[in-house]
Image: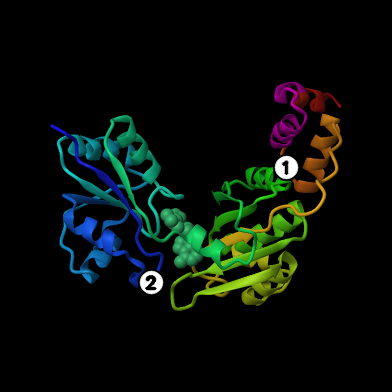
Amino acid sequence: MSSGTLYIVSTPIGNLEDITLRALRVLKEADFIAAEDTRHTQKLLSHFNIHKNLTSYHDHNKEEKAPVITARLLEGQSAALVSDAGTPGISDPGYYLINMAIRKIIPVVPIPGPTAAIAALSVSGLPTDAFVFEGFLPPKRSQRLLKLDSLKTERRTIILYEAPHKILKTLMDIRDVMGERRVSLSRELTKIHEDTLRGNISDIIRTVESAYGAAGNGESQASRGRSAGIRGEITLIIEGLMGEPLPARAEDPLAIIESLMRDRGLSRKAASAEAARITGLSRKEIYNASLKK
Ligand code: SAM
């Protein structure tokens, strides 16, 4: 028996009018729909008068559900994979199932449509000829700083997803690590309170700080997740490095470790990892050498 098809169906990131005609047809015709949040998707389906079996597939059950879903596909059923919003697999658990289906030689077909990354990029006014999508920064601060450091010399436009309660701190870290540059912050795209702030990062920081009602003190308020301040879903676009390349960094690994610990507050371990990346030396050796210094 030939296997069914797994359709990767993009759904609106806010405005329901952004659903495509093809997405509606595939959602109606599929044998079942695998949804990140079945209640959320049920609302979408009810709006379009679609009545269909839903099964949940999310980050916390993906390892147990992906084999069940692919088994049904191998039996000949067709499935539509949808995430809460946008394109499945873009910073959501879709990748795991898509990858498993491909490995089992199940046809995987895209039903393209909205994705926050491209929507935000398209209105940013920043170069779109070459860009890099980084999704969410790592949750741990030391790793976030390392990631930003590695993006410092990136010449392509950079796309990031960020949570509203972290955005102020993230903007400050970007300015500290990557320097002054243009950014575009898109919030609640396609929804009633959609807006896009464009400008130098310092100007955007000031605007976001004033939204918290506490200029210069946004960090603690932001991290407490107060009800005031910037809310909603945010996609941040950062201008790539312009002009001459940055001067080569000092190659002394111990000096690099010290400066990362002093200036960026990294742990010795994280600083050694970064110094190893920069110099190409062994992380363990330079970590041990820095302990003896
Ligand atoms: N798969 C989705 C896509 O294709 O856009 C992204 C899923 S990711 C878990 C959710 C993140 O996308 C949000 O935290 C936010 O950073 C961004 N996002 C989603 N909807 C958005 C919107 N309407 N406006 C701005 N950013 C949005």
Residue 233 in view, yes or no: no
Whole-percent x, y for residue 65 in the image = 27, 40
For numbered disc 2, what is the local secondary structure? Answer: loop
The amino acid sitting under disc 2 is Asn
Whole-percent x, y for residue 248 in the image = 84, 39
Horizontal side of residue 216 vs 69, given as left or right: right
Taking the view exactly as shown, the residue that stands out farthest to the left is 1
Residue 254 in view, yes or no: yes
Disc 2 residue: CB within 8 Å of ligand 1: no
Horizontal side of residue 119 vs 242, given as left or right: left
The front one of 130 and 96 is: 130
The front one of 238 and 143 is: 238
Whole-percent x, y for residue 38 in the image = 26, 57
For numbered disc 1, what is the local secondary structure? Answer: loop
Taking the magenta stretch, the answer to whether it contains residue 106 is no
The front one of 210 and 29 is: 29
Mark whose residue sits in front, 2 or 1: 2
The amino acid sitting under disc 1 is Leu
**In this picture, which residue range is highlighted in magenta?**
268-285
Predominant SS of the magenta segment: helix
Q: Give me the disc on residue 131.
A: none
When asked about the image quadrant of residue 101, the answer is: top left
Identify the residue shown where x is 19% and y is 34%. Answer: 74
Q: Quadrant of the N terminus?
A: top left
Identify the residue shown where x is 74% and y is 52%. Answer: 241
In the rendered image, which residue does mark 1 sit on? 266
In the rendered image, which residue does mark 2 sit on? 15
Q: Quadrant of the C terminus?
A: top right
